[in-house]
Image: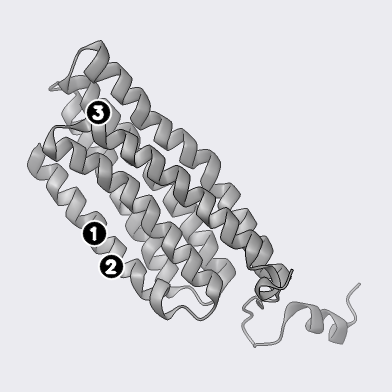
Amino acid sequence: MERFFLGAAIACCLIIFLTLYRAVFGPTVFDRIVGAGFVGTKTAVLLVLIGFIYKRLDMFVDLALVYSILNFIGTLIFSKYLVRGGTR
Amino acid sequence: MIVALPLVIICVSAGIFFFFAGAVGFLRFPDFYSRMHATGKGDTFGILLCCIGLSMYNLAAHPSWQLGVVQSVKVLSIAVFWFLASPTATHALTRSAFVSGVKPWTRDGIPVREREEEEGAP
């Protein structure tokens, strides 16, 4: 079962690399924010999978929870701050 | 344990598939709003399926209170939190992009409001 979790974690990493294209070369600044948020969603799942691989889920699940909360707050703050290019 | 393992594999694989579909839509769709549509749906459903599968696996592997039930509820709480937070973040980002003047994509390149004025629509 560890092998399946390792494969799922590698698939998550590949999807993160696919998404990073839009986060680096995005036409608008909002595309870059969405790219960063999309990476954060994968990272929460990736942390839980790493917890299963290392058999220390009780530590990694708290990290995943805190990471997802911080990612959500960061996205909200950026979307509030960047209305009309930061002038309002 | 034996009953749970195929369910775990199906749930996590379906979650990874929805992540992949969201990433493909995020790369291929023509404008910002359709990209938000792809990522918002794919992300929410993918993380829900992944967390349900992983919490089932943890509950089957550790049939105890401290290592089994508590950690499974924590993994499920990640899914519940994202189920509330991801549509909120999508809505806030889309609204701020619309207020900032990001144009929606149309087939002939004319924005929707100007075309309505040309055709005399109400």
- The residue at which mark 2 appears reads as A17
Q: Residues within 10 Å of mark 3 (few under 14, many from 20)?
A: some
- The residue at which mark 3 appears reads as A58
State the colouring used for the structure image. Answer: one colour
Q: Which mark is residue B90?
A: none
Q: Are marks 1 and 3 in contact (CB under 8 Å)?
A: no
* Number of numbered discs visible in the structure rendering: 3
- Does residue A70 appear to the left or right of A88 in the view shown? left
Q: Is residue A52 visible?
A: yes
**What amino acid is found at the position of numbered circle 2 in the picture?**
Phe
Q: Is residue B18 visible?
A: no
* Residue B102 position (above or below residue B11): below
Q: Nearer the viewer, residue A63 or B42?
A: A63
Distance between mark 1 and mark 2 Cα atoms:
6 Å
Identify the chain of the residue marked 3, using the numbered disc in the image: A
Q: Earlier in the sequence, mark 1 or mark 3?
A: 1
Determine the residue positioned at 42% across, 63% down: A36
Determine the residue positioned at 21% across, 56% down: A11
Q: Are marks 1 and 2 in contact (CB under 8 Å)?
A: yes
Residue B109: x and y in percent read 65, 87
Look at the numbered disc 3 and give the secondary structure of its residue. Answer: helix
Residue B122: x and y in percent read 91, 72
